[in-house]
Amino acid sequence: MRNRALMLCLSAVAALLWLGLVAFMHRQPPNSVNQAVFLAIWGAAVSCTVIPISFALNSRLAPASGKAQELARAIRQGLLLGALAMTLVALRFLRLLNIPTAVLLTLVVIMVEILAYLRSR
């Protein structure tokens, strides 16, 4: 029950972060400081959105490995996707993002997740 309450809280925080991101984008001019704040809110919003989804999918589809490991895996996956989203948007802000770079970074994140999963097995 505690994990379910945590996932509901994270979902509420994610909704607030997305609303805050929309409000921030409409009220602030795009300078370098505001872009850094945008990236922080963006990464937190993506992480808080992915963690409950990942927890639900892992508890349904992955083999039973214990509630603590399922929660740790969901948090790790959420943080990895949040970091990937922040990195891709930051590269886009710098005009350095292209398709091969995005694919390579995504594959690196997938590889890190696979290695972490294999290590915990």
Image (spheres, rainbow, N blue to C red):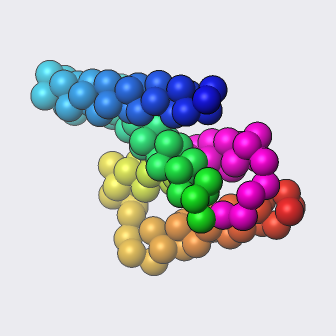
Based on the displayed image, in which of its 4 quarters is residue 1 positioned?
A: top right
| Position in image of residue 49 (x %, y %) | 42, 42
Q: Is residue 117 visible?
A: yes
| Position in image of residue 115 (x %, y %) | 78, 66
| Position in image of residue 77 (x %, y %) | 60, 51
Q: Is residue 26 left or right of residue 97?
A: left
Based on the displayed image, in which of its 4 quarters is residue 28 positioned?
A: top left
Q: Is residue 80 visible?
A: no
Q: Is residue 94 left or right of residue 82?
A: left
Name the main secondary structure of what is drawn in magenta: helix
The image shows residue 118, relative to residue 38, as above or below, that is below
98 or 67, which is in the foreground? 67
Name the residue at 72% across, 64% down: 63
80 or 94, which is in the foreground? 80
Name the residue at 33% across, 49% down: 93
Based on the displayed image, in which of its 4 quarters is residue 42 positioned?
A: top left
- Highlighted magenta segment, given as a residue range: 62-79
Name the residue at 57% across, 48% down: 55
Name the residue at 41% across, 48% down: 90
73 or 106, which is in the foreground? 73
Find the residue positioned furthest to the bottom.
100
Q: Is residue 65 magenta?
A: yes
The image shows residue 62, relative to residue 7, as above or below, that is below
Q: Is residue 27 magenta?
A: no
| Position in image of residue 61 (x %, y %) | 59, 65
Quarter of the picture containing the C terminus is bottom right
